[in-house]
Amino acid sequence: MKFVLQLRVGGVDQGMRYMLYGLLSGFLLGSCAPAQPESGDVSAKEKILREEKLFHEAYESLDAAVLDRLLTAEYTLSHRGRDGYKTRRQFLDELGQLRTIFPALRITTDSIRYEAVDDGGRTRGLRTFTWRQDGTSGTYRERYTNYWQWDAGRWRLTSTELSTE
């Protein structure tokens, strides 16, 4: 596609003509494509979603060291319909045991949605656990809600709520 702009301005002084050219070219360039944010200009939503992705990659590979860096010191995990909750340390310890109990465990995450909340962000999604043990396979699905807050110079996970699917 060829685009030609021809502008004829008669009786207008040189300075006015250049200003008109500048305005028109600025309008045409500005309407070609949306501006891309610079690397330092990333929204809280984008940053939280990046951390959420990192969390899921570490969770799916049962990498407790990476997860440890993503959780606040006060992190808690609760399961709707069950009494009590797990602390950060209990969550990380149990995660390490999963690979021993279920060597062929596979965890996948999908349906991630983001919502802004007063002092951070909330992500919701669905996680599926699939395994094979002693010739028997199994599947378990859970819905989760992760709550993110700005902590010690970065976005960290403060709590997770689970419910069985």
Image (cartoon, rainbow, N blue to C red):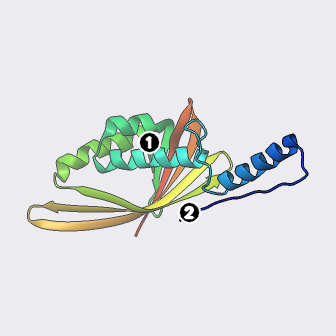
Position of residue 160 measured from the top left corner of the image (x, y, whole percent): 48, 51
Q: Residues within 10 Å of mark 2 (few under 14, many from 20)?
A: few
Q: Amino acid at mark 2?
A: Lys
Position of residue 100 measured from the top left corner of the image (x, y, whole percent): 18, 46
Is residue 84 among what the camera can see? no
> 73 above or below 159?
above
Callout 2 secondary element = loop
Where's the C terminus, which quadrant?
bottom left
Residue 96 placement: quadrant: top left
Left or right of residue 142: residue 102: left
The residue singled out by tag 1 in the image is 87
The residue singled out by tag 2 in the image is 2
Residue 80 vs residue 115, the one in the foreground:
115
Q: CA distance from mark 2 to mark 1?
A: 63 Å
Q: Amino acid at mark 1?
A: Thr
Is residue 123 among what the camera can see? yes
Q: Residue at x 16, y 51 (%)?
A: 103
Position of residue 147 measured from the top left corner of the image (x, y, whole percent): 54, 49
Q: Which mark is residue 117?
A: none
- So how many labels did they put on this image? 2
Farthest-out residue, bottom: 165
